[in-house]
Structures are given as C-alpha cells and as structure tokens.
Image (cartoon, coloured by chain):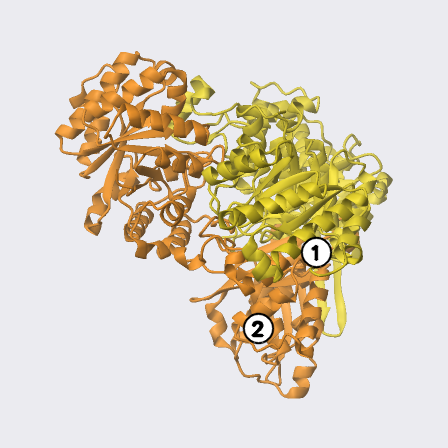
Chain colours: A orange, B yellow
Amino acid sequence: MSKSISIFDTTLRDGTQGEGISLSADDKLKIAKKLDDLGVHYIEGGIPGSNNKDIEFFKRVKELHLNAKITAFGSTRRKNSITEQDDNLQRMINAGVPAATLVGKTWDFHVHTALQTTLEENLAMIGESIAYLKRKGLEVIFDAEHFFDGYKNNPEYASAVLTTAREAGADWLVMCDTNGGTLPNEIQEMVSGMALKLPGASLGIHTHNDCELAVANTLSAISAGARQVQGTINGYGERCGNANLCSIIPTLQLKMGYPCIPGDSLPQLTNTAHFISEVANVNLPVNQPYVGNAAFAHKGGIHVSAILRDSRTYEHIAPELVGNKQRVLVSELAGQSNVLSKAQDMGLSLDPSSEQARKVIDKIKTLEHQGYQFEGADASLELLLREATGEVNELFTFESFKMLVEKTADHPVVSEAFVKLRVGGESLYTAAEGNGPVNALDNALRKALLTYFPQLKDMHLSDYKVRVLDEKDQTAAKVRVLIESKDFNNTWSTVGVSSNVIEASWEALVDSMRYALLGQISLQNETEANQAPRGLVNH
Amino acid sequence: MSKSISIFDTTLRDGTQGEGISLSADDKLKIAKKLDDLGVHYIEGGIPGSNNKDIEFFKRVKELHLNAKITAFGSTRRKNSITEQDDNLQRMINAGVPAATLVGKTWDFHVHTALQTTLEENLAMIGESIAYLKRKGLEVIFDAEHFFDGYKNNPEYASAVLTTAREAGADWLVMCDTNGGTLPNEIQEMVSGMALKLPGASLGIHTHNDCELAVANTLSAISAGARQVQGTINGYGERCGNANLCSIIPTLQLKMGYPCIPGDSLPQLTNTAHFISEVANVNLPVNQPYVGNAAFAHKGGIHVSAILRDSRTYEHIAPELVGNKQRVLVSELAGQSNVLSKAQDMGLSLDPSSEQARKVIDKIKTLEHQGYQFEGADASLELLLREATGEVNELFTFESFKMLVEKTADHPVVSEAFVKLRVGGESLYTAAEGNGPVNALDNALRKALLTYFPQLKDMHLSDYKVRVLDEKDQTAAKVRVLIESKDFNNTWSTVGVSSNVIEASWEALVDSMRYALLGQISLQNETEANQAPRGLVNH
C-alpha cells in the first residue's frame, strides 16, 4: 500500500468556524492560491449558497486555474425527501467544482437527537445523496461525522454507515472525531478495525483539538492505514480548532516517511502559515510548532552555549527544512553567549574577551535588572551593541517634552504633546495632538525630525504593549513599554522602562526612530552629541 | 501499581524560558499560591542564584506554607571537580527547599559535544551529585535530559544513566524529550522498555511541544508506566513550550482514570489558567483546549441547534467539570445566566424576566463588546448590577481632570494632576504630584474626596495592569486598565477602557473609590447626581 498522503485543506470552511476567523471572498481566493502553491491536493472552499462570500468564491476560484481540486461542502439530503429535489445537494452541484465533501451522521445518538429520524432513513439519506452526486460526475469525499463516538456507542451502525457510503460510490471514507474527545490509542484501534473490514477502501481522518490531541490522533490514523488528512493551516477551526496541517505535514514527511507535498515546497510552510494568519488577521502564536517565531528560539543559557557548538543539541530538525530560522533570545536567564551570538548575527566584531564586550554585557544585565527586556526588543538591543562598538551617530539631542491630557464632563478627552530637540545645531520646538498620550508624543517627535529625516514618514507604530513590573510596591511600580514599528520592508521592536508610563513610552519611541535612522550621518557637532543625556536617548 | 499521578509543575522555571514570559518574584509567589490551591504535588520555583528574582522567591515562598513541595533546579556538578565544592549544588542546598530537580546528560552526543567530557565522567557527575544531595536530606528528582534522543543513539548508555541515578538514590527518574522531536509510539516503546529494566522505579515524563505532540507523548508515557508528569500551565516553556498541564490533567483524570489532583479542585482549572495568563500578562489563546473561552463555544448553525437539544451532541465533556462554560457565539442566550447568578451571589434580587435585568445584561454585553472585561473586575461589575437595582448613590459629580507630564534633559520627569469635582453641592479643585500620571491622579482624586470621606485614607492601589486591545489597528487601539485596591479587610478590582491610557486609568480609579464608598449616603441633591456624566463615572 502506497505511503503517499492526500492533503485535504479545510481552512476556508471548517477553519472559518473558529472564533474570530472571518474571511472575505478576496481573502479566500488569496488563501486558495497560497495553498495551491504549497501543493495541497484538495481545497474545501466553503458551503455553496450558505452565504454570498462562498457563492462569489466558487464563481471566481475557477479563474485561478489551480492544480488542487476545489471541493464544496454540504450535508446529506433532508430526511423523508426526494434526493433530486434537495436544494442543498443542488447547490453543491451548481458550484461547478470537481469534488464534493458530503457529511453524514454516523452516531446513532445524533440520528435520534439531532436529525430526529430512524437509523434506516439516515442510511438511505447517505446512500442516495452519494449516488446522486456520483451520477452528476462529482468526486465524493464522505465525512462520517462523529465516527468515533458513534463506533463506541454502536460499532455495527458506524460500520454500516461506511459500508453504505462505499457501496454508493464514495471515493473517500473520512472518519471524523467531530467533538475532539477521542484518544490516540482509540483512534488507532478503530481505524485499524475499519481498514480490516473494508479492504482496499480509501480511508481518511478528520480530527479536532479539544484534548490537544488532533495532531497525534491524525498520526495514529495514518499508521493504522488512513491515507487522507483533513486539517487547516495553523489549526483554525470550531472551538479548539482542527488538526494543524503545519505540524502534521512536516512530521509525516520528515519523521515518518509519508510523502505529503512536493519536497521542494516544504520550505514554504513557515511563509504560508504567516501569510494566512495575516490574511485572517490573527496573530500567529509565537510558540507554534515548526512555523512560529519562537519554534527555534533559544533562551536558556546552557541551551544557547550548546547550540552555538552544534545546533542539533537543542533542535529536533534543521529550521530551514520548513523555512523557519534559528533565533537566540536575550534574557536574564541567559549568559553572555546569547549576547555575543546576537552581535555576530548583526555582523558586529565583538571580541568576547574584550573590555568592550564585558562592558556592554554588564550594561545589558544592569538594564535587565531594572526591568528592561530585550528578547522582545531586538532593535533596542542592536542600538546598545552598535553603541558599544561605536557604530551609532546621535542624530539629535533631547531637550524636553511636555504631555498634557485633559478631560471635562462635557467634552471628550484631549491629548497634546510638546517636544524640544536640537538637530544640526538648530533648536526645534513642536506641538501635536493625538488620540492618546503616546500617539501625541509620536506625532510631535516625528514632526520635529521629519524636516531633517523625511524617510521617517514611511514608518509607523504597529504594536504597543505595557507591562507593570513589581506590582508589590505600588507607588514605586515600574512599567515596561514595548513598541513595534514598521516601514515598507521591516518590522522592529524597542523597549522603555520607567516608573512613569509616559517616560517609558518616550524612551521606546526615541529608540524606534533612532533605529529607523541607523547609518545616517550626525548633523550636530561633537560637543552637542556628548550632551545627549544617556539616561534617555541611550537609556 | 497505583494509577495516582504526581503532578510536577515547572511554570516558574521551564515556563519562564518561553519567549515573552518574564515573571517578577511577586508574580512567582502569586502563581505558586494558585498552583498550590489547584493541588499540584511539586512546584519547581527556579534556578537558585541564577538571578535575583529566584533568590527572592526561594526566600519568601517559605512564608506561604504551601502543601506542594517546592523544588530548586540545577545541573550535575562541573566535570572533573569536587562535588562538595560545586557552587551550583551548594546553591540548591542553600535554597532551603525539601526537593531538588537535578538535570543530567543522557545523550552520548551531548556528553561529547556540549559537556566535552567522557561518558564515564558524566556518569560520575550524576551519581556523585545525587548522592551528595541525598546526604543533605533532599528529595531528588533526576531529569534525564534528551533521554529519548540518547536512547535512540546509544540505548546502553541512556539506560546506564538511569541505573546510575537510581543506585545513587534518586527518588524519581524523569525521562525528558528535551528537543520535543520524539513521536508517541517511540515514547511508549522506550518508557515500557525502561519500566521492564528498572522494576519498581518511580518513572516520570517531561516533554516539549515542538511537534505539537507534548500532550500525546505524556499520555503515552503514562500508559507505559510513568507516574510523574512534568509540565506547565498553558504549556508555557522554551521554544514551542512544555507539556500543557491544563490539557493533561483533565484527560488523565476524566478520560483515562488516573487521579492527578483532588476531584473537587478540577473545576478550578479554567480559573487557574486564566489567572496565571493574567499574571504573566500574555493572552490566553481563545481556542485553548478545556480552558479557552472558545473551548465550548459553538458557532456553526447546525451545531448550535443541536447543542440546544442536548449539549453532548457537540461537547466531549461537560464544561463545568473543568470550570469552563458553554458559549453560543450567535445566540443572545450566552452570558445572561451567569450575570444573573453573579447578582444572586451579591444578594441582589434581580428578576430574570424583568426589564431591569434585560437592561443591565444589554449594558454589560455592550461594554464587553467595547473591551471591558469583568472576569478580573468584580467591583466594577457589582457597581453596574447595584446601579441596575438602584442601590448606588452617586457621591460626587465629575467636572474635569488635567494631567501633565514634563521631562527636561537635566531634571527627572514630573507628573501633576488637577481634579475638579462637586461633592455635597461644593466644588472641589485639587492638585497633586505623583511618581507617575496614575499615581498623581490617584493622589488628587483622593485629596478631593478625603474631606468628605475620611475612610478613603485606609485604601490604596495594590495592583495596576494595562492590556492593549486590538493591537492590529494601532491608531485606534484601545487599552484596558485593571486596578486592584486594598483596605484593611478587603481587596477589590475595577476596570476602565479607552483609547487613552490616562482616561482608562481614571475610570478604574473612580470605580475603585465608588466601590470603597458603597453604602455611603449621597451628599448631593438629586439634580446634581443626575448630571453625573454616565460615560465616566458609571462607564
């Protein structure tokens, strides 16, 4: 029996049933194209006629001429009705796709409680619906809903459902763990059982993550003989989500020897996961297996010194195989090895044994003790390291800022900022409003600098995080502000710490602009540059 | 062989090696208390002497008199050195805890590459370090690092490591999948193998989630005879995280019949997960198994109608078993019942069918939609409910506040607040400084109210949290401020939301004082009370 696995992606259907996932027709088309580039075999586009988005998707997806087969999802005909007159089946046919995913009840309890019909009628609904779609020339993937709960409750009936579907001509028999409550050893046992009962049948698996076992359950089913995997990118889906294809594909292909997608497209996996999370407008969890930003990020000091010797010491695969990369995080848990390898990444020549290196490492440790955290602020760290090697020009000197927030009973809150800087020997005094204090400061600082550094107009704040430190001593509590900034090509993060949230934000803002201007020539004479108050402009 | 499982939590050690997780000593103490309430058996507190936070934690945790055993983490003695003189072992002993987690190399490749010593010396390092800690009266949990990679590469040596540790007196032999690259069937096989080789030994399992299999691998090891589970709350940890105890505990206890924690504390699981994510200041993934807000949330139309008939149709367990609840994302039914039960808890008579009840529930829904979150702000919720039943007297009318932050190059930052209120028909205008804007507002507001409500001098802010909502849309991003306040007898929490962090803080501050003054008689005439701008004083 061939070990090749058919990858069935349902990001566009089951994936959109996850909380907070909502895709326009355009989004769906972009994602379909991306999935096709990755090399999946089936793309389930949605439920024809359920909403306008899906109708539009099925119309326009044909123009993309994808290699993957597009499938339309729907359920068996209504009880006690004529198959040929079922609107739902009609819509699946009219979608004009080569394949249909037909879902049918498999759990006797559901037949009685949800469908409220007889076991016999349910079998008829399944058999007749499949036969009809086959007569219309569609490939039929039959999703046996709640197969495993059904099998536990009434194995004869669950088996009868699959047998009926097969005899009616279904091309794939997919066993679904719809509620996500089944355990890997149970899946193994029941799928092997069906593989014996239905020799030569093409079996598939569809799992949900309610016990954090969707991936393991899928792998169990494959070992037991299933050859189609239904899942979603990043595990999007109803409740706790569907089986995550971004974890299943590399494990099957790299560790278990089951070919899933063309080997040369596996390195596109990380990019595909990030692209789709962007289109879906949800953050990709930093710790997501294989494709997350932290999937190959090392923080523990012992770990870091070891991976610098040989990355296999703390990496289960080479990150490049899935298009990800190794990162070293700096934190109080880490020794100087982290800092030095960071410097290396930046192409800085920092001799580990040098006075220079010792100084900057001590400085970083002191700052971390004060509450700075550089693992989330690469740009601030880079500024520190470049300063240590004398590679940063101070482009302006800080003189003062004022920030005013005013609220009266009958007017909305107002925020204004006033910033005084010296640039190129000239004193600049600017004022700006904002929808909040940080936004006002950002606007005023930018206004002051734009005259000298027009390139700053291309950058903007993309994220802002505040963390209160040592809450025990409230009046002296410090806040840490992390700011993420973007321009057309790059994203960078900076940090500021103070007992005053405004001052902390200012620090991070200043670092963000200094980083954007790295490599610029100083416009001020030395004496002025030296007057730059270290505490603020350079921490 | 007993089926009872020993739960070993390493949220405070391995958990803090996850990207973006950084805990103060106070955070760690709060989490330890919460873990102890849940009923875990071991709490790994950190690495003694690695940083000041951990030193402070080990000092102060004793005052909490927890039932769980606190353990200190460290590695075997340095190569070619005298055990009794090893600072690292010394620090573990000086931490003054009952148990030590000692990590030792098990993979011959690591002994050569990372340690750069001989296989014999590594065995000596393990044996001597364990024997020494035992002589000092410590319980010793031996973490066999990279056990599974080691076993694949050199089974004799990996076994020799465990045998050495056992003979030296280790109380637990824990097999670690340090790189997270091992598959469930491999784990099953190797753990069974060791269970046969070491009859009667207490075996444990420590897995990482690099293949999204940490939970499945843990369950495999348990079926194969392991009886200790090492993991973290919410799966925090290096790279892709550790095994998630929030998924493992309910599956073992409810589905596999392995007792882990007292049955009556299992319903605390959801609350524990959310509490710890709040303290760590990271969002709990909405789709997290068992404890996530969407874990039992139903969106698909078919699903919803079915669960309204019988929730077993689409729920693998009853949400209440883990302290979670069913949510219907499309239906208005959601939330109502728990708001009413909250009101009942407060001894408020709120007739579910009344106009009053409908109004307050709609108001709460609207506020939650705007980003308010009452889970962490009981006092604000109580104020809303008491307002609905007309039990709150507005004690003052807001007129205005101003907040000024000023920083010059050669002076530290200054924060001043100016507050104007009407109390008892009198207009009060006060000004105050603070070490930050919120502190200044707090001082000015308190100053104004103290003349009429001297009891406010006994209350103070004890915690302040800021969370940025919808970070995607930066310029319109909202912030949620949670304030915790204390007096001699009580602690209460309030919430404020605005696109302006100062206004959000003001809202929470005002609610905090209004709550402190619940039951006070209004000093102002009705007309004035009615002029209280709802937007601010009552949200």
Q: Are marks 2 and 1 on the same chain?
A: no
Camera sees residue B386: yes
Helix, strand or loop under label 2: helix
Q: Position of residue B442 (x, y in %)?
A: 76, 49
Camera sees residue A408: no
| Quarter in which the N terminus of chain A is drawn | top left
Mark nearer the viewer, 2 or 1 = 2
| Quarter in which the C terminus of chain A is drawn | bottom right
Q: Position of residue A379 (x, y in %)?
A: 56, 67
Query: Label 2 crowding class (10 Å Cα cut-off): few <14, some 14-19, many 20+?
Result: many
Q: Is residue A70 left or right of residue A354?
A: left
Helix, strand or loop under label 1: strand
Mark 1 belongs to chain: B
The vertical placement of A299 against A390, above or below, is: above
Q: Position of residue A253 (x, y in %)?
A: 36, 48
The residue that mark 2 highlights is A514
The residue that mark 1 highlights is B402
Q: Position of residue B53 (x, y in %)?
A: 74, 53
Viewer-nearest residue: B415 or B185: B185
The vertical placement of B344 against B45, above or below, is: above
Which dot marks residue A487? none
Tell me the amino acid under the disc marked 1: Lys
Verify CB contact (< 8 Å) between mark 2 and mark 1: no
Q: Residue at x 43, y 17 (%)?
A: B309
Tell me the amino acid under the disc marked 2: Arg
3D distance between C-alphas at marks 2 and 1: 31 Å
Q: Is residue A340 left or right of residue B391?
A: left
Query: Label 1 crowding class (10 Å Cα cut-off): few <14, some 14-19, many 20+?
Result: many
Mark 2 belongs to chain: A
Q: Residue at x 47, y 48 (%)?
A: A289
